[in-house]
Amino acid sequence: MSIFKRSAAPSADLTGLTEVLGARADVLAAGSGDRVSLVGTREHLALRRGDQWRVWRWEEVGSGSWNGEAKVFRWRTVTGERFEAALDEVGRLPDLFRERVQASTLVTSVVDAQRGQVQIVGRRGLGSDPTIHWYAVPSGGADLNDPATKQLVVEETDRLAGEYL
């Protein structure tokens, strides 16, 4: 259950968001800056720079943070891409961001590789699509191309999928 009600910052420019999403934008929180809007909906995180939108489903968003002193919101995707937006207003966007990322996370598990570890993460969409998306996040020098590490990841993902499907 979400604790958020529709609360877009009045100055957030939502022009064109409905068209990009293909449905009415159900905005829960938003932040804005100079020709930048960062919007959290029930199912998506959306960034507008100038006239262009870029949209991620919540299960594609790995982590993020708000730096109030620098007035910069930073986030990364589960594939490792990094983004940031300079915002003058954030409203409840940092809280919504944390809640939506947590809500889309079904399970996490860590396996030890020959070098380092790999975190296996099962994420699901927050809309009508119940598909679980699986991600492997290496750390400490773990190499996902190493055959032994690959085998560990496949075995753990299969085990988790058997429990959560």
Image (cartoon, rainbow, N blue to C red):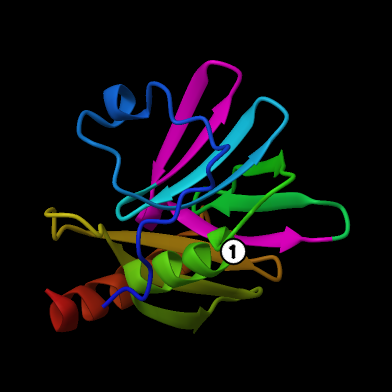
Q: Secondary structure at mark 1?
A: helix
**Residue at image x 32%, y 25%?**
20
Residue 94 x, y percent position in the rendering: 59, 63
Few, some or many residues within 10 Å of mark 1 (<14, 14–19, 20+): some
Q: In the shown orientation, is residue 12 left or right of residue 161?
A: right
Q: Is residue 51 magenta?
A: yes
- Relative to residue 67, is residue 80 depicted above or below? above
Residue 96 x, y percent position in the rendering: 48, 65
Amino acid marked by disc 1: Pro
Magenta range is 45-68
**Residue at image x 71%, y 60%?**
66
* Magenta-colored segment: predominant secondary structure: strand
**Residue at image x 32%, y 61%?**
134
**Residue at image x 31%, y 73%?**
2
For the N terminus, the image quarter is bottom left
Q: Which residue matches tag 1?
A: 94
Q: In the shown orientation, is residue 108 left or right of residue 42?
A: right
Q: Is residue 4 visible?
A: yes
Residue 103 x, y percent position in the rendering: 35, 72
Residue furthest to the front: 10
Q: In the shown orientation, is residue 12 left or right of residue 5?
A: right
Residue furthest to the top: 51
- Relative to residue 113, is residue 36 depicted above or below? above
For the C terminus, the image quarter is bottom left
Residue 118 x, y percent position in the rendering: 53, 72
